[in-house]
Amino acid sequence: DAEITQGGLRLQHLSFGYDAAQPVLHDINLEIPAGSFYGIVGHTGSGKSTLLSLLLRFYTAQAGRIDVDGVPLASYSDEHFRASVGLVPQEPFLLAANARENIAMGRPISEADIIAAAKAARVHEFILQLEHGYDTPLGEGGARLSTGQKQLIAIARALAGKPRILFLDEATSHIDSETEQIVQMALTDLRGKVTIVAIAHRLSTIRDADSIIVLNHGKLSEQGSHAEL
Ligand code: ATP
Ligand code: MG
């Protein structure tokens, strides 16, 4: 069976619409080397989350192809794919459970790995400040956390699975600049350890990215470093 060992991505002539009559992505060509950090920016509705949905196999493109480590995306078993790819969604969902359970998500992950993931997501100190630390209930849907804090927990959750590829869809709203800076630092620390594809609403979040791509009405319109764009 195919295995994702490096986490390199290649998109060729990728086109997609939820409804075939209304294309959302047009002829996307993109190479994301294993271990690199790529940022995606673009106006609301430009197709950023849709692109992630295709990379995550939630939908299948009508045209073109996606290869991971040189093999078509569909070659991987669901079990292997889920274990190799981490997603931090735009609207993270938290369980009515404690911090530890929200990071482990039912997977057999050791306490040491949970803490390492929380540290990498820079949310460990925050958790320790809660009244019962990792045993503190986070409330229904994470009611007691801000959206930014939920994203940090979601980053820890994704990292706890030790993915080869990390997809992050930055929350659109209510991210205070302090949390945004923590996300930016966490991503920078992960550089080179895992392939990162991060959608950002603020260019500062991905200022350390190796490359930033700009989506405009479903087309890849520009690509370059933070300094170049
Ligand atoms: P934002 O910055 O607001 O998150 P985005 O760049 O992530 O925007 P997408 O969510 O990918 O944009 O949406 C691209 C287009 O596809 C929009 O026109 C949107 O209305 C449409 N769309 C998104 N999700 C669906 C869906 N599940 N079914 C049908 N159309 C969808
Ligand atoms: Mg989106």
Image (cartoon, grey):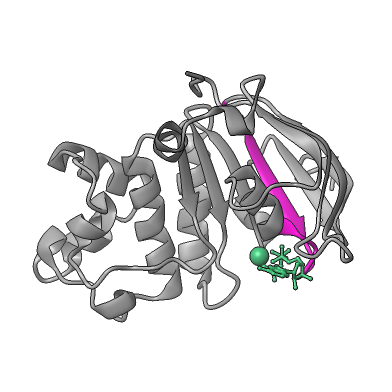
Residue depicted at 36% across the width and 34% down the height: 162
- Between residue 167 and residue 212, name the one nearer to us: 167
Percent across and percent down for residue 44 are: 75, 70
Residue depicted at 22% across the width and 51% down the height: 106
Q: Is residue 217 above or below residue 107?
A: below
- Between residue 147 and residue 131, name the one nearer to us: 147
Q: Is residue 210 above or below residue 132?
A: above
Magenta residue check for 45: yes
- In this image, 60 relative to 92: left or right? right
* Image quadrant in which you'd find residue 163: top left
Percent across and percent down for residue 130 are: 17, 69
- In this image, 25 relative to 212: left or right? right
| Residue 149 in sight | yes
Percent across and percent down for residue 46 are: 80, 63
Please state the quadrant of the image where ligand 2 appears.
bottom right
The magenta stretch is: 35-48
| Residue 207 in sight | no
- In this image, 188 relative to 120: left or right? right
Magenta residue check for 59: no
- In this image, 118 relative to 21: left or right? left
Percent across and percent down for residue 210 are: 68, 34
